[in-house]
Image (tube, rainbow, N blue to C red):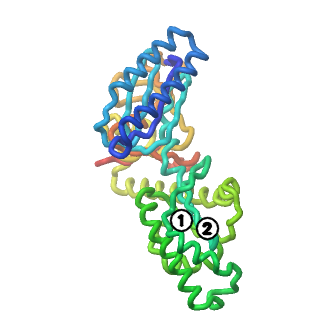
Amino acid sequence: MHYRPAISIIMPFEPKISLQTEILYSLKIAADKVEQELVKNYPDEMSKRVMKKLRGLLKDLDFSTRKKSIAIYVSPVFEKVLYLDVAAEEKIIIDESFEIRDLVYSKKQLHKYLVLLLSTKENKMYLGNSDNFVRLVFDVPTEEVDKFSVLPEKVANFSDLSGRKEIQMDKYLHHIDNALDGILHAYHLPLFVMGTERIMGHFKKMTNHAAAVAEYIHGNYDETTEPELMNVLKPYIDNLKKAKQKEILLQLDIAAGRKTLSFGMKDVWREAMDHNGKLLVVEKNYMYPAQQAGVDDVIYKADKSVSPVAYIRDAVDDVIEKVLEKGGDVEFVDKDLLSNYQHIALVHYY
């Protein structure tokens, strides 16, 4: 049943990396935002009741956890905290129902990537996501940049460079490649390298990080704005997502061959309730209204006559929650990609 307002707060939560005071401050800011919205749109008594529940949950959080994110769900009649292995970005949702799939959509690994912009003038390193770029500190000695910036940009080919200038270019790129060590260690994300063919050709020959490069994109992007860079990168990001989906489908094929795969809502539900969900794969926007059959691990598709007591608005959301709670992962794929698996599939732990 719908008990509005239903508050969902999704936040990064890594006490082993961030200070507890920083996490608490971020959660306080989130709670203040929720309170402002409640006061504006809901009766005073209900707002106070929900906020009392929310602040009570925040006081009792477990900072000894080794999880990556936290999901807090609160309504006038319900409260729950999930500690999850899924890395997530901050998200606050005030609606008439809880949508745990929103948590999965916010997974960092699906939306984030690194961009290295190579140039004779200035190298730049960005952390990109679906909305913007964040400039990262890139530790290359200033004197090396100054030395290299005097090299001529317009050269027909590598042989036109004098031996000294070619050595200087390689030294410059070697410093950049060394600086990549720390970046790639901190961010396990696909890397796009952008620059002219001349400088890119040298970089390809000497880099120790070729395996991390998703794509080399040729061009002169010295004067390109960040929104323009995002437009250039969009088709490459789309291709990366398609490749990811192919990899997921291959995992399902392998699991099917090993007899460690369930598919179709009824079988997936049963295994998830039995805590046997290592990887759940579901088509975007796939929903399954259901009714329980008197036992926890059996459901049927709901019809109009179902009793409200046995009614499950969307069994997919419940399965997602069960899989995440037990340390499993969840991936979404495009519509009809799982037509052979009845739109939803679950890889077992055993």
Horizontal relation, residue 86 to residue 65: left or right = right
Taking 65 as reference, is 2 above or below it? above
Mark in front: 1 vs 2: 2
Amino acid type for the residue under numbered disc 1: Ala
Name the spot of residue 165 as percent of width and height, x first: 59, 86
Q: Amino acid at mark 2?
A: Glu
Give the secondary structure at mark 1.
strand
Give x and y (percent) for residue 47: 51, 14
Where is residue 307? Give x, y as percent: 46, 16
Q: Considering depth in this image, is 33 or 71 the residue closer to the camera?
A: 33
Q: Secondary structure at mark 2?
A: loop
State the mark number for residue 58. none
- Cα gap from disc 1 to disc 2, whole angstroms: 22 Å
Looking at the image, is mark 1 or mark 2 earlier in the sequence?
2
Can residue 342 be seen at all in this image of the molecule? no
Q: Residue at x 54, y 55 (%)?
A: 127
* Residue at the spot 69% in from the left edge and 70% down from the top edge: 220
Front-lying residue, 234 or 266? 234
Give the labeled residue for mark 1: 214
Image quadrant in which you'd find residue 345: top left
Point out residue 190 in the picture as x, y percentages from the top left corner. 51, 60
Label 1: few (<14), some (14–19) or many (≥20) C-alpha neighbours in 10 Å:
some
Image side of residue 50 versus residue 15, left or right:
right
Residue picked out by circle 2: 122
The residue carrying pointer 2 sits among few (fewer than 14), some (14 to 19) or many (20 or more) residues within 10 Å by Cα, namely: few
